[in-house]
Image (tube, rainbow, N blue to C red):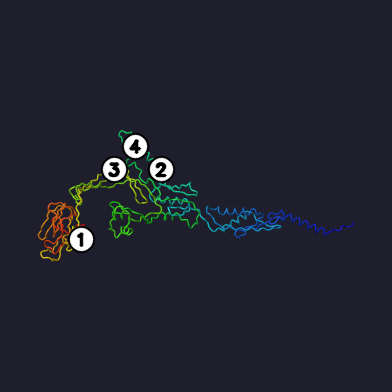
Amino acid sequence: MKKKKINHKKYKFTYIKVTMSTLFLGILFLKGYTPFEHTGENIFHIQVNGQDVGTLGDKSHVEELLLQARRNVVSVSDDLVFMDVDMAVVGEEVLWGEVDREEDVLRRMEAALQSGVYETMQRSYTLKINEYIINLASMEDVRGLLQAAIDKYGGEGKFIVELKQDAGKEFNIFTPNIARSSSDEEERQSHMEAGVEKFLAGITGTEAESGEKDFGDYDLGIQEMHFSEDVEITEAYLPPNRVTSLEDAIHLVLMEQEMPAVYEVAAGDTLTEIAIKLNIPMDKIAEMNGMKDINDILNIGDQLLITVPEPELSVERVEEKYYEESYETDVIYIDNPDWYTNHSVLRRQPSAGARRIIANVSYINDREVGREILKEEVLMEAVAKVIERGTVVPPTYIKPISGGRLTSGFGMRDISVPGATSNHKAVDWAVPTGTTVFASSGGTVSRAGWGSGYGYVVYIDHPDGRQTRYAHLSKVLVSVGQKVNQGEKIALSGSTGVASGPHLHFELLISGTQVNPMDYVK
């Protein structure tokens, strides 16, 4: 039998062809590889912020993955995150190539974005007190600061801070309100109901009562509180270094500082009393107001510049208080039309009384600014001081001559004229003969004529018991018993009697004794 000759070359080719076909089909269906198609770029290499984050076979998913990565980075907190985002996608056409899972690409994108974060803006709250601004980390810190402000003045848990959103404004803006706590409000309501029941029992009982509240019916303590300044809270995103801790904020906002203020001088005020009342040294008040010294005169209505210790945030409150005090009643005056106003006599010594009081006392911080008495009961009546006083204005004295040169004062002097005394009990003015002499004060002429060494003289008795004398006259123009007014012409000057030259000699006597006229002449 003739053997058939095998074509090894043909079998070899067929083997190679089958092997290649099998390999190609394996590659085609192998996961992670892209089949070769002549459609252009079919694999894409991705970089974020310069870092390789993976390769994908579908470009349309790249932007979606980046957006999701950004969401994931910023979702871990409420902070506002600023980051660099620089993505590059490079495509190419390949016969086959390895790609990554989208989950892995997303994870590497997040890591690349996290390394590009350059600033984190923390969600915070800006508290504005008039023009003063402070930033806090949370709304709880805002409440904590405002609550500390009212607790500082003895709220004792009865009052709490509520934050209300202003619906009329575009942004999230809150304003604070101080309200009674629910537990305190219930207690207060119960107290009021008990008072009403007591009142009803009184008016329906056997004895009628006035219905007036007794001392035990009052709800003592703080009645109301509110902030003095305009306070506004807004949401904001700020760098962490601009946010203040609650502890520091309490110190900064509630710490007392020297604030400028004005004090109006009231009746009876002295610099000493004002200094005590305001707790400011007298010399400091004098210095701030340009006074020469602490003895400068104050007038009612004067406005003094002062400084008072005040915090940035002030709290006003009304507190119902019970207290007992001693008191004095008003002075009783008895007018005497026969006395001058500079004469008075104490007719009865005063004695202080005692009383108990319920009052609403108003404060700004710790400074009292008002007091309203709600109920008062006198425990012991005060005895008023009684003073009898004159109502007649005392006479005044003027210089009895116009001009002139003072040549001899009151007291000891050198004797230049024979017969003159060395103890001069008057004042002399050198004037030309014939100069008009006026009555220094109104009164009755008791002497008019010649007076020995005085020459021509005029004596005038005045209603206050004093007497004036005018000597060395050249002519007398009035007569004894005549009534004259202050400033009325009574004589002409001269040099009669013992005189060294023309002048006016003027004396003032009190109870018959000469005194220095210049101590009384205006």
Residue 355 in percent (x, y) is at 28, 45
Q: CA distance from mark 2 to mark 4?
A: 21 Å
Nearer-N-terminus badge (1/3): 3
Q: CA distance from mark 3 to mark 4?
A: 20 Å
Q: Nearer the viewer, residue 305 or 485?
A: 485
What residue did someone put label 1 on? 403
Amino acid, disc 1: Gly
What residue did someone put label 2 on? 185
Nearer-N-terminus badge (3/4): 4
Q: Nearer the viewer, residue 499 or 512?
A: 499
Q: Which mark is residue 377?
A: 3
Rendering quarter of residue 522: bottom left
Q: Is residue 515 above or below residue 384?
A: below
Report crowding for label 4: few under 14, some 14 to 19, many 20 or more residues within 10 A (C-alpha): some
Residue at 44% over, 53% down? 128
Residue 392 in percent (x, y) is at 20, 49
Where disc 3 sits, the SS reads: strand
Nearer-N-terminus badge (2/3): 2
What residue did someone put label 4 on? 199
In the rendered image, the residue lying farthest to the right is 1
In the image, taking residue 108 as reference, residue 333 lies left or right, namely left
Q: Nearer the viewer, residue 39 or 208?
A: 39
Q: CA distance from mark 2 to mark 3?
A: 29 Å
Where disc 1 sits, the SS reads: loop
Nearer-N-terminus badge (1/2): 2
Residue at 28% over, 56% down? 297
